[in-house]
Image (tube, rainbow, N blue to C red):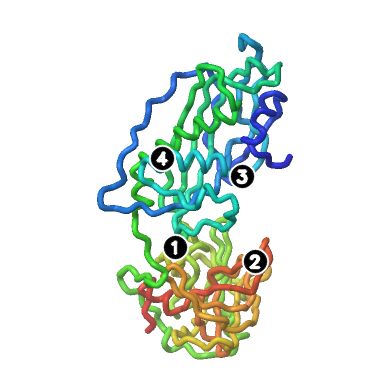
Amino acid sequence: MSRAVLLGLAAAMAVTGAAWAQTPAGAAKPPVAAPVATPPPGPAVALVDAPVGADARPFGFSRVVIRMPLGASFQSPHIGIFCIAAAGNKTWQVSGDSPQKPGPYQQVLREEMAPAGFKVDGDPDNVFETASSTSDIQLAAIITQVDMDYCQPRIGFGDVSIRGHGSLSVQWQVYSTIQKQVLAKIDTTGSAEFKEVTAGGLQALLLAAFRENVRKLSASKSFRDAVASTPSLPGDLAKPTPQTPIVLAGALAAKPRPVNEAVSAVVLILAGDSEGSGFLASSDGLVLTARHVVGDAKYVKIRWSDGAEGLGEVVRADKARDVALIKTDPRGHAPLRLRREPLQPGDAVFAVGAPLDPKFQSTVTRGVISAYRTFSGLNYIQSDATVNPGNSGGPLLDDKGEAIGATVGGYTVTGAPTNINLFIPVGDAMDFLSATPK
């Protein structure tokens, strides 16, 4: 079934009794109770002034999705002059996040946010405006529960006017495009009641309940703090957090070697359902990798290029820089030589890892240094050396087999690689992990 827009087909759903669905992607969502008798409306939410001395930044709002459990009851419609005839409960039957057209929601958001001192990005009166929001703060609404108990007494005459009660539960997410992280998650529930028959049908009731959610959001301290905070600028380099130094024994004594020999120091890392790569950075078994490869795991499985396996313990990680150190038995393997000095754009480099599947462990791809980048205060090496999921944490080598970086990610277009891939400079990795070669 195609993903239909709830607002656009609200009246049709009430008449036909069609089933609609939404299944959370990868995680259980809060259960939705069957509609019950119309409860009294919730308390009004007082709007308060914006924080004194803090200018709230404009924010963009262009993403609304419905994320409800498959089979959840979300409508209890009645028809007829006396609202006695039940039209059958509707259940949600669409799998996955169901994107909604944001226009009607945006209008409500603007109307409620303005009195609270907030500015929603964009010009609502410019129908020709097609550019994306330029605000560094973006707001999204995830509707997690819908409960509509209503009557359409004149539906037999083609009149979709409605009376009844409706409520929505929304998880709001405030995202910083500069810091590339969610700054706040705020859960709200708002309800509305039409005691008299009201024009606009189900859409009007939905938007009235959404309006109450917006009012609660604007009164939330978490939201106000998030949009009033000062972001770190892209030009401000992030600083490592001071930690007790870790010594990379034997790193200074490591010798350059041909790339085909350097592959023996590259490992496959298995952490639960996650897999990635890493490389030996010390003679006593410290393996450097990407933090997102190990996640929150304390212990991981290490597989060497010769097939030998062992246990690894995550001894240090830095989530912001996305690097981690694992302690394991080196099994006689020599560490890679670590090179801080940058290469020049156009110089040859080699990426080593286990792309897509563990059976492709020790895959080597060749490319060049494309550029050096700084995103959100963090340095990256850009290269066209091909990498895929599974390469993360693996080394980027120069032509002498020296590690100059660790794979962190790449850009794709509709799932296809673009040869724009990013690597964490090995010097940055050591600095953020307080690891010192010796």
Spatial CA distance of label 3 from label 2 is 35 Å
Spatial CA distance of label 1 from label 3 is 24 Å
In depth, the one of 410 and 75 nearer the eye is 75
Which badge, 3 or 2, comes first in the chain's sequence? 3
The mark found on residue 178 in the picture is 1
Identify the amino acid type marked 4: Leu
Position of 83 with respect to 373 (left or right) is: right
* Quarter of the image that includes the C terminus: bottom left
Q: Nearer the viewer, mark 3 or mark 2?
A: 3
Residue density around tag 4, few if under 14, some if 14–19, many if 20 or more, within 10 Å: many
Q: Residue at x 46, y 66 (%)?
A: 322
Which badge, 2 or 1, comes first in the chain's sequence? 1
Residue density around tag 3, few if under 14, some if 14–19, many if 20 or more, within 10 Å: some
Relative image position of residue 19 (x, y in whole percent)? 69, 30
Secondary structure at badge 1 equals loop
Residue on which the image places disc 2: 358
Q: Nearer the viewer, mark 2 or mark 4?
A: 4
Residue on which the image places disc 3: 99
Residue on which the image places disc 4: 217
In the displayed structure, would residue 353 be above or below residue 16? below
Secondary structure at badge 4 equals helix
Spatial CA distance of label 1 from label 4 is 22 Å
Identify the amino acid type marked 2: Pro
Q: Residue at x 62, y 78 (%)?
A: 385
Identify the amino acid type marked 3: Pro
In depth, the one of 217 and 310 nearer the eye is 217
In depth, the one of 155 and 185 nearer the eye is 155
Q: Mark 3 and 4 residues: CB-CB less than 8 Å, in contact?
A: no
* Quarter of the image that includes the N terminus: top right
